[in-house]
Every structure is written in C-alpha cells, then in structure tokens.
C-alpha cells in the first residue's frame, strides 16, 4: 500500500526526520520515585517527592512546560474550602461533595483539605493567584484584603442542594438565604505549568520530555507483583528507555478518543490533551492492577473538532457573568452571577427547555450572542482577559478576536449554543470516570504503584489533580524510603521491546489513523447508546479481530508515528476493558451512562456498588466495592496524615 509519505518520498519531497534515530538503543535510569505523566498531577507528585530529598524521575510524552489538559492554563481553582474567604468547613464540604454515587471520596477529602495549601505553594513557585496589580478592583468576588478573586459564577450554596433547597448545614450563617460558599478561586493558571516545570528542575527532578511510557515492570515480570519500574521510548529519537524505581506514580490521565477520530482535525476528537490515550490505565491493567467504573461512558461533550472548539462560545464556563441576548438583542433567561440551579457549565434542563420552546415559537431569534458591551467594565475585563485569557485554549479565541479588531466593549460575541447541534449518541467518551482503584495512600492495588489526578477512578478537576498529585508524591516517597532495592526482569523488558518496535520493522501495511478509525467504528456500532450482552460480545469480537489481523499490520515510518501506533494499541485495550466492565454490570445505570436493554432496571439497589476489573493470570477478574468503601472521610484522612500540617495559611 502506498501512503502519502511514500508518494512524497518518490517525488523526493519527504523531509528528513529532524532527530537522530536510535531505535533499539537503550538507556537505563534509576529512580527512588518514578512519575509517569508530567501533567498537573505528575508535576505536583514529582515536586512533593523531591522535597523529601529523593531521587525523582519524571517521564512525559510531550514537553512538561505545557503538556496535558492543564498545560495551557486554568481559570477556576475549584473546591478550595480551606481558603480564608470560604464560608464552609472543609470536612463538611468534602462530605457534601462526596454525596454522589460513584464519586471518589478519598480524592475529594484530600482536595478539600489540601487544595488551598497547594494553591499557596503554587504561589511560592511563581504562579499568580491574586490580583496583585489591582487590575480587577471592584469586581464581584474580589477580596480587597487578600486580593483573591472568588468566582461569582460557581459556588453558590443552594446550587448544590438536592431540589435547590435553601437550608444548608454547611453555612456559617444563621440566615436562611443564598450565600456564596466562596470555594472557587479565579486564578492566572497560564502561569502554573511553567512554574511547575521550573520547580521540578530547581529540586533536581530528572525530566525526560518526549518519552512515552509503554509498560510497567513488575518483580520477576509477574502480573500482580510489585511494580519496580517502567519502559518507554523517546518519540523523537526512538531510543528505548528502561526506568528502575522503588515506587512509581501513574499520572497519565484517563482514556482517549475511543469512539471517534477526526482525520481532518489532528486525528482526534476529545476535550482533553492529544497525548492522553489511556496509556497509564492500560499499563496498570496489564500489570494486574484493579480498575473501577470502566463501564461509565457518556456522549462526547465539547471541543470534539466537530463542534465549536470551546464549549458553546459565549455563555459557558469561563464566560463568567456574560448576559446572553438573542439576534434582536432580547435578553435570554440565562442566569448570570451564579448558575444557581445548574451545574457549572450549562443552564438547568428547565431553562434550556424554555429557551428551546421560545426559539420554536419565534420568541427568541438565533443566533445568540454574549453581550459583553452591557457588562460593567471591570466585569468585562475580568471575563475577557482573566477568565478567557487564562482558561486554556480560550486564549486562542481572545487572541484571534483581538487581532481581528474585536472590541469587547462594543462588540457582541456569538454563541454557538442551539445552532451547532448535539453530539450523536454513538459519539461517546470514557469521560472522567474509569480509573485505578486507590486507597488512602493513593496506592493502587499493586505494591509500589500509586496514582494521582485523572488517572484515578472518578477524578475531578485541575486543583484536584494538583492536590492528589502532591499527596501521592508524599506517600510514594514514604514507601520508597522504606522498601528495598528493586530488580527488573530482563525477559519482561525484551518482550516489551519487541512489542514497541514491531511497527517500525514494517515498511508498509496499516497506518495508525486507519487502525484508530477501525477501533472507533467498532465502538460506535457495538458499545453505543444501547447495550446488550450480544452487542457487547460482538464488540469484543470485533476488537479481537482488529488485534489479531490489523495490529500486526501497523507500520510506523518515524518515532512520532510509532507513538501514534502504540497509542492506538492502548485505545484498543482500553476499549476492551470498557466492554468487560459493561458486561459485568447487569443493570442499567443513570450516573454511569449505561443503558442495558437486556437489564433495563435503572440503578437497582443491589447494583449500587463499584464493580472492579483486573487481569489475573491473563484472565479478566471482576470484583466489587461498596459505594463508600473509603469509610469515614475525615477520620481516615486524619489517621493517614498525622504528620501533615497545612504549612501555609489554610484553616
Ligand atoms: C481546555 C481545558 C480547560 C480546562 N480548564 C480547567 C479549569 O479552569 N479548572 C479546572 O479545575 N480544570 C480545568 N480543566 C481540567 C484540568 O486541566 C484537568 O483536570 C487536569 O489537567 C488533570 O490533570 P492530570 O494530571 O490528571 O492530567 P493532565 O494534566 O492532562 O496530565 C496528563 C499528562 O500525562 C502525559 N502522558 C499521557 N500518556 C503518557 C505516557 N504514555 N507517557 C508519558 N506521559 C504521558 C500527558 O502528556 C500529560 O502531560 C481544563 C481542561 C481542558 C482540556
């Protein structure tokens, strides 16, 4: 089969690969603590382990300076109830936040206790967390004393109460009224990732950028045994990397774009970073670690490449306080100054339905716009410059608009809500759900292996990744100090090396995009909106066929394409795990987005539990855990953190 690359080569136009090729060559690195994934959780983990004086190695597929979902920025530091402006008690707030089925009570408790300490530590590293230049004096939520900026949009109490009730035991106020919890702080998150990398370097963390980790090494190469290192390869030179470690922290985030591939738009269709392809979860799976909530999937939400890049344009998340008007300037019933009845991102279903009906009746003319000009100047600047400037990819939006002459004090900004259409039910995503089972040390079910951030089951957001990374770093360092030297199995290394380099040994066959498209198609057909035992088994068969017939055809002409090929294999394995977990849950579930036609009862009491899956001697083993298997959150946290003091100004 001839490829575009072949054609360019024949025509003499193919550019030379700009890096030296070192396929098969080896580099061996020793670490006390090995961190895999240099995103938010990974950087924090590396820093906190290095603060304890240990030899820390950080492996990152991209460049740590901006890699991962949080690389470009972050505008909301969520869930920091220990901040001095907060109106809630961290432990009570943690309980409240964990009062949802299938959440991660361990991570939430850590976040609520340590999130503000983490933010202050970020400030010490050079991240900007306060309005020190008084740019936004007078903005809603800005505190003149601390110069912290609370988010006016998030963190109203009764938005979190079932039924929108107003009684709230958590509020330090005897008045029965809406009151701001002040748990969400607006931050200058584009400063964070460079600060994290700089701090890693300052502390002597050895960073291996552009290295994709491919597999975990276990004692004697046995599945289920203690983790003693990992393998990887440099995606520019192709060099093989062998990392030996006393403890290892996985922080490669969650699953990737399993149901969809957009060949026109970078081959990807997912909100999160392109580098996130389920690798860590699959590495842990192959090593025998227990995973949970893998059956939880949902319809693709935002930034798919098939929809507007970032949410729906004016009117969502970072567009804090922007009133929405219709094409004739009529104000829509979008709540501003706090999305009282809704989740953070969208209007409540009732409000949305009312707008939809209004459109059909001709009461509201499409398209809608964000009415920036009607906002007070300080609020407008805070939203346009701070929120959109810091959020992440939204910076591209404001830069592009500014360059084109957009003036937010005069111009409306189009909203894509209601005109961009909805995702199809077969365009799904693994979402923020499945991941590694962890205990109160953020240790997985394998000795020597820890997890943090989106790598764990039921993760939350940026600050959660930061706080749990920081915590996992401490705990993995404790273990590394106690445990003896590790020994890796050469046989296991050789097996992995053969697997890794197989695609570069072929000069023709199937390229990664085609394989990715095949996996996505199988998932769209068989693991879609409706699930039955037979459909799921057909999905497994289809993936098995791809594994047996197509994977051996994969060819990669350079180290970058080799990375893409190996990512496909991760996606394939991840997809199979989703099917195994979906087969195991013989009930439908609303929070898990699981509709089993053959088991229509939705969340029946006997199925309200976590199902776990793992490989044991190469066979899938299903287990279960109670919904609150972590026990009393406050007590457990305190029992496991006797030495921890919030050294910063937390409560
Ligand atoms: C556009 C956007 C805006 C957001 N805004 C906010 C916000 O304002 N507030 C908020 O709270 N949250 C926000 N989030 C979510 C937040 O960014 C994530 O929750 C957070 O980054 C998760 O951290 P993590 O460490 O788990 O994953 P990531 O930060 O994504 O890090 C995972 C890292 O692992 C690396 N990796 C993957 N596979 C491998 C491998 N095989 N080998 C080596 N390295 C590997 C990746 O390259 C990446 O660097 C936003 C996300 C996006 C995409």
Image (cartoon, grey):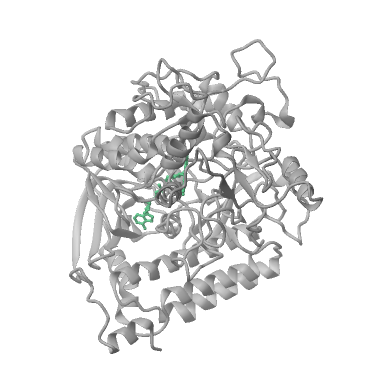
Drawn side of residue 42 relative to residue 355, left or right: left
Q: Residue 539: percent from the left, percent from the top? A: 61, 70
Q: Is residue 470 above or below residue 247?
A: above
In this rendering, the answer to whether 431 lies above or below 373 is: below
Residue 391 drawn at (x, y percent): 44, 42
Q: Please say if 93 is above or below 457.
A: above
606 relative position to 562: left or right: right
* Side of 20 where 128 appears, left or right: right
- Which residue occupies the extreme right position in the image? 361
Q: Please tell me which residue is depicted at 25% across the width and 86% down the height of the picture.
A: 12
Q: Quadrant of the N terminus?
A: bottom left
Asked if one can make out residue 464 in the rendered structure from this viewpoint, the answer is: no
Residue 533 visible in this rendered orientation of the protein = yes
- State the quadrant of the C terminus: top left
Classify residue 128 by image quadrant: top left
Viewer-side residue, 398 vs 425? 398
The spot of residue 134 in percent (x, y) is: 38, 23
**Residue at the image point whose x is 63% and y is 42% from the top:** 346
Tell me if 222 is positioned left or right of 431 in this view: left
User: Which residue is more in the foreground, 275 or 212?
Assistant: 275
Q: Give the image location of residue 124, x and y in percent.
A: 29, 28
Number of residue marks: 0
- For image coordinates 32% across by 60% down, the residue present is 212
- Residue 562 falls in image quadrant: bottom left
Quarter of the view holding residue 570: bottom left
């Amino acid at each position: 089969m001839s490829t575009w690359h072949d054609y360019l080569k024949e025509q003499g136009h193919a550019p030379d690969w700009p890096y030296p090729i070192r396929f098969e060559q080896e580099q061996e690195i020793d670490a006390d603590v090995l961190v895999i994934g240099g995103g938010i959780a990974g950087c924090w983990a590396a820093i906190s382990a290095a603060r304890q004086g240990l030899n820390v190695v950080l492996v990152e597929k991209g460049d740590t300076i901006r890699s991962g979902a949080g690389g470009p920025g972050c505008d909301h530091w969520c869930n920091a109830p220990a901040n001095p402006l907060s109106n809630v008690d961290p432990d009570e707030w943690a309980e409240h936040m964990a009062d949802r089925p299938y959440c991660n009570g361990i991570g939430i408790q850590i976040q609520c206790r340590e999130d503000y300490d983490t933010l202050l530590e970020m400030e010490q590293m050079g991240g900007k967390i306060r309005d020190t230049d008084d740019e936004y004096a007078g903005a809603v939520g800005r505190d003149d004393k601390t110069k912290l900026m609370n988010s006016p949009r998030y963190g109203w109490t009764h938005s979190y109460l079932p039924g929108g009730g107003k009684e709230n035991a958590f509020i330090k106020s005897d008045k029965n009224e809406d009151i701001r919890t002040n748990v969400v702080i607006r931050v200058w998150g584009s400063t964070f990732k460079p600060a994290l990398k700089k701090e890693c370097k300052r502390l002597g963390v050895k960073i291996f950028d552009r290295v994709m980790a491919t597999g975990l090494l276990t004692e004697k190469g046995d599945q289920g045994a203690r983790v003693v290192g990992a393998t990887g390869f440099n995606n520019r030179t192709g060099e093989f990397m062998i990392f030996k470690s006393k403890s290892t922290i996985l922080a490669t985030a969650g699953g990737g774009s399993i149901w969809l591939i957009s060949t026109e738009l970078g081959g990807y269709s997912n909100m999160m970073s392109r580098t996130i392809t389920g690798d860590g979860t699959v590495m842990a799976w192959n090593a025998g670690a227990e995973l949970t909530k893998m059956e939880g999937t949902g319809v693709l939400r935002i930034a798919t490449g098939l929809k507007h890049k970032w949410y729906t344009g004016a009117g969502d998340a970072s567009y804090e306080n922007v009133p929405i008007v219709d094409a004739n300037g009529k104000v829509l019933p979008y709540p501003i100054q706090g999305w009282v009845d809704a989740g953070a991102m969208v209007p409540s279903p009732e409000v949305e339905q009312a707008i939809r009906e209004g459109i059909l009746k001709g009461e509201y003319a499409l398209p809608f716009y964000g009415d920036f000009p009607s906002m007070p100047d300080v609020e407008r600047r805070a939203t346009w410059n701070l929120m959109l400037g810091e959020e992440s990819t939204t910076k591209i939006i404001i830069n592009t608009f500014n360059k084109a002459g957009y003036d937010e004090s005069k111009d409306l900004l189009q909203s894509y809500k209601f005109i961009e259409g909805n995702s199809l039910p077969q365009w799904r995503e693994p979402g923020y759900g499945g991941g590694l089972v962890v205990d109160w040390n953020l240790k997985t079910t394998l000795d020597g292996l820890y997890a943090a951030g989106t790598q764990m089951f039921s993760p939350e957001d940026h600050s959660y990744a930061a706080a749990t990374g920081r915590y996992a770093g401490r705990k993995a360092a404790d273990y590394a100090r106690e445990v003896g030297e590790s020994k890796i199995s050469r046989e296991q290394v050789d097996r992995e090396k053969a697997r890794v380099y197989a695609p570069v040994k072929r000069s023709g066959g199937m390229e990664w995009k085609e394989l990715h498209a095949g996996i996505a198609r199988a998932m769209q057909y068989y693991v879609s909106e409706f699930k039955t035992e037979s459909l799921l088994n057909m999905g497994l068969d289809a993936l098995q066929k791809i594994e047996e017939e197509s994977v051996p055809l994969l060819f990669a002409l350079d180290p970058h394409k080799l990375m893409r090929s190996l990512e496909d294999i991760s996606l394939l394995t991840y997809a199979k795990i989703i099917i195994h977990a979906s087969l195991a849950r013989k009930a439908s579930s609303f929070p898990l987005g699981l509709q089993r036609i053959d088991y229509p009862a939705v969340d029946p009491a006997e199925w309200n539990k976590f199902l776990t899956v793992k490989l044991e001697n190469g066979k899938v083993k299903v287990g279960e855990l109670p919904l609150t298997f972590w026990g009393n959150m406050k007590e457990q946290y305190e029992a496991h953190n006797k030495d921890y003091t919030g050294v910063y100004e937390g409560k």
